[in-house]
Image (tube, rainbow, N blue to C red):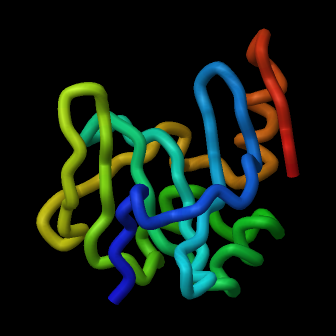
Amino acid sequence: MLVAERKNLNHVAVLISGESIHLEILENDSSNIFFSCQSTWPVGTICFAATISLFCMFLEDLVDLQTLLYLSPSLFVEIANPVKTALYSRQDIDIHLRHGNKSLSGLRNIASQSPAHGNYY
């Protein structure tokens, strides 16, 4: 079981950064891949695991961000905001990602429309 706790993860790359979207790739000491992005419910920054095949499907626009979370091997995910940082069981809560219905190309379009934008991948 992969638990996504940001304190145990290392930064790999920023895939997209814009006013309303920031998507990072992280990894743990065992080289497992994790995504970090914003959630709208619960509100905060979420970290969750992805397999190599899921990561590739996302890069190829075959799945959207919310599907990536649904297919994640993480049973527990971390969501942090200015008030608290907590681990949530994905079986107990319905997590909604900001722009979760967008694929990578859709997220890039959103980021490119914001004044301070960047696509780093």
Q: Quadrant of residue 20?
A: top right
Is 4 situated left or right of 67 in this image? Answer: left
In this view, the residue farthest toward the top is: 115
Give me the residue at 69% from left, 74% from top: 55
Q: Position of residue 56 (x, y in %)?
A: 76, 77
Q: Quadrant of residue 41?
A: top left
Is 42 situated left or right of 15 in this image? Answer: left
Q: Position of residue 37 (x, y in %)?
A: 52, 46
Is 80 situated left or right of 102 in this image? Answer: left
Q: Position of residue 81 (x, y in %)?
A: 30, 33
Q: How many marks?
A: 0
Q: Position of residue 28 (x, y in %)?
A: 53, 74
Q: Nearer the viewer, residue 81 or 41?
A: 81
Give me the residue at 25% from left, 41% from top: 42
Q: Indicate the quadrant containing the N terminus: top left, top right, bottom left or bottom right.
A: bottom left
Q: Quadrant of residue 94?
A: bottom left
Above or below: residue 45 compared with residue 35: above
Above or below: residue 103 compared with residue 44: below
Give me the residue at 77% from left, 63% from top: 61
Above or below: residue 95 compared with residue 112: below
